[in-house]
Image: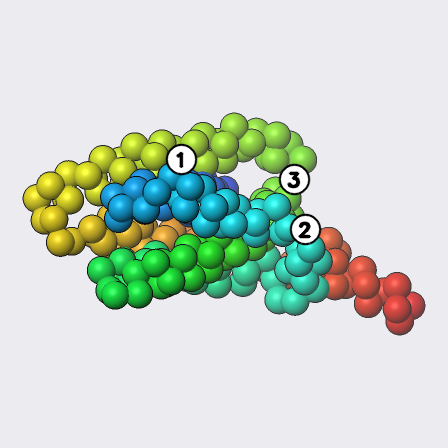
Amino acid sequence: MSKMEKKRSPWAWIPTLYFAEGLPNVVVMTVAVVMYMEMGMTDTEIALYTSWLGLPWVIKPLWSPFVDLFKTKRWWVLAMQLLLGAAFAGVAFTVNTSFWFQGTMFFFFLMAFSSATHDIAADGFYMLDLDSHDQSWFVGIRNTFYRIAVIFGQGVLVWLAGELQKIYPDSSSSPRCRSSRLCSCCSSCCFTASPKPCSPRWQAHSCCARWRRVVWD
């Protein structure tokens, strides 16, 4: 890693990283409920189906070792943000089809899985790139942008969906399209601003490197 990259400010990537972490969670757990209510589903049906969407966050420790073993945290962060953008777009494009329920549930579940994996990689990325002092200093910053994403998802997106539904009754996908573009923008920011994991410090903290030492040394 070059000297310039070592000095790259965490302000360049922490806000977008944790905004991208908070937005999918609130969309899956809140906006999905509002959307299904507008589509005419009963409260019992909504509770039954959307409760399964929280499963990936519950069981994410089961595949978190694979995130350490394969590729880098930066690769996982960027890949999951792009996949989240695709999942948002998938919801937008299937919500007005004849198979809207199956299509949106598939993409919501893909969104939940991608978001849970993104959480694992983002927190690991944060721990590896920052020393203990910076970790303590930026913990409030990352929580702030996570909460901004929650407020944006619960407030702005829901309000925007309602307003557009009044203006364009047959088009309820615009907020999801905007969410897709937001995730794509966050991915672009993280790609250009985040440090690359090529220093010995990253390698020393790699679970894969530790595993290889245990097996071969």
Residue at the (32%, 46%) spot, across then down: 41
Rounded to the nearest angstrom, the CA distance separating label 3 from label 1 is: 27 Å
Judging from the image, what secondary structure is the residue with disc 1 in?
Answer: helix
Between 100 and 209, the residue placed more toward the observer is 100
Horizontally, residue 203 falls left or right of residue 45, namely right
- x and y, in percent, of residue 3 in the image: 56, 54
* Quarter of the view holding residue 86: bottom left
Horizontally, residue 196 falls left or right of residue 83, namely right
Q: Earlier in the sequence, mark 1 or mark 2?
A: 2
Q: Earlier in the sequence, mark 3 or mark 1?
A: 3
The residue to which callout 1 is attached is: 150
Residue at the (56%, 31%) spot, across then down: 139
Judging from the image, what secondary structure is the residue with disc 2 in?
Answer: helix
The residue type indicated by label 3 comes to: Asp
> Closer to the camera: disc 2 or disc 3?
2
Between 179 and 121, the residue placed more toward the observer is 179
The residue to which callout 2 is attached is: 61
